[in-house]
Amino acid sequence: MKILSISTRGNELKFYLFEMDDQSIIANGIISRIGLEDSSYSISFGSENITEHVEFRDYNDVANILFDKLVTLNIINSSIDINGIGFRVVHGGSKYVDSVFVNDKVIQDIGDLSDFAPSYNDSISLAMRSFRKIFPDIPMVAVFDTAFNQTISEENYLYPLPLDWYEKYGIRKYGFYGTSHKYVTKKVSEILGRNDFKLISCHLGNGGSVSAIENMKVIDTSMGFTPLSGIMMGTRSGDIDPSIIPYIMKKEGLNVGEVIDELNNNSGIYGLSQYSGDMLEILEECDKGNENAIRAKNKFVRSVADYIGKYYVLLGGVDVIAFTAGIGENSVQIRREICEKLACLGVKLDLDINNHIGEMIKISTDDSKIQVYVIPTKEELMVAMDTEKLIKNR
């Protein structure tokens, strides 16, 4: 079975074509600047990597040209070869607790939730509409980043705000990166050979999320109403005192949207370092003695360790801590420094094994009270797996 996995952000679409029999990647690529000048696509398959400037006026062009390229490059024979398309949807609100087949109502609901995730929900709903119109015979599935977090209890998802804000407007914690945490949870279950465990899953990339998971269900997660809250991230602030917003509006002469844009795009690691939101570049600057970079790195490590400590208490102990995503999978130093702060919980790191990067591996010592793993995330594959599951069970 061949499944196409699709995600979007703004004017960009990423795709992976999987052969589900062995979960291998047949092809993957990116379509950039959709609806803008200098739009282009890149596609990788086998040993080939092709980039070309092509006019993508809208998602109708994306759907038509993408499938045309897959055929002309002999990746597939025709659209009939594609058994399903899975769309990664960032925000499903409270309505969607699991993946669902795409229909007109689902597309409308996703579009209606655009206020919660405007860079994501708008574009994915447009993509769904176009692909469904052009390829009506291919089963299509919406896989929600927020769905895995729907097991969070009212006690943990409600904010201490006027209750009618939740009842009228749906203001509550939703959490994000659920697709990644779900994949990590599945892998931990396979490693341990059981489902009754306590896990703290740390998705650390340009965006970041820490989740407390017990018996395969999310108990709490660091991100909230939007992906802006939680741990410090590449360019996002994470948790701050909300009174900062009106204060800076007054001092800088900015409106609410402009301040929120600063918190999303010019804060976090980038904001504190005044150099970069890329942890690899930050660590290089740290080695050079750049004080701003050192400050940003230390603050990031502290913010992650704080959430792990918080969730250790919430869960009443932890069996496994898992690191995933760009920083979690590849930064030996950040993993080490986070674990050093967790020594009081009995975490012991095997420094030699921790030098491994980008592979699934246990990095804690045998006498560590908590097992620590690196588990490379595969969000695109998780989307494809959910899509395959629904198609087979319909």
Image: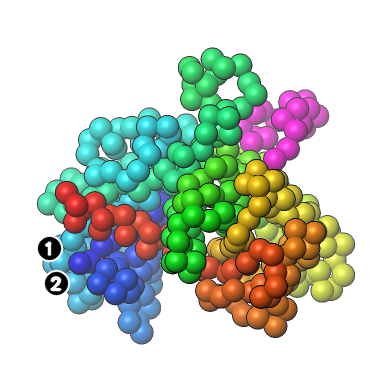
Q: Residue 80 in the image: x percent, y percent?
A: 12, 63
Going by the numbered disc 2, the residue's amino acid type is Asn
**Quadrant position of the N terminus in the picture:** bottom left
User: In terms of depth relative to the viewer, which is nearer, 78 or 140?
Assistant: 140
Q: Is residue 258 magenta?
A: yes
User: In terms of depth relative to the viewer, which is nearer, 376 or 151?
Assistant: 151
Q: Residue at x 58, y 38 (%)?
A: 224
Q: Residue 393 in the image: x percent, y percent?
A: 19, 52
Whether 227 is drawn above or below 305: the answer is: above
Quarter of the rendering containing residue 163:
top right
Is mark 1 in CB contact (under 8 Å) with mark 2?
Answer: yes
Q: Residue at x 24, y 43 (%)?
A: 102
Q: Residue 68 in the image: x percent, y percent?
A: 20, 65
List the residue tagged with mark 2.
77
Whether 143 is drawn above or below 194: the answer is: above
What separation in Å lies between label 1 and label 2 (alpha carbons)? 8 Å
Q: Determine whether, in the image, residue 72 is placed left or right of residue 368.
A: left
- Is any atom of residue 281 visible in this view? no
List the residue tagged with mark 1.
80
- Which residues fall within the magenta stretch? 237-260
Graded by Cα atoms within 10 Å as few (under 14), some (14 to 19) or many (20 or more), the crowding at tag 2 reads: some
Going by the numbered disc 1, the residue's amino acid type is Ile
* Number of numbered discs overlaid on the protein picture: 2
Whether 239 is drawn above or below 135: the answer is: above
Q: Determine whether, in the image, residue 329 is placed left or right of residue 10.
A: right
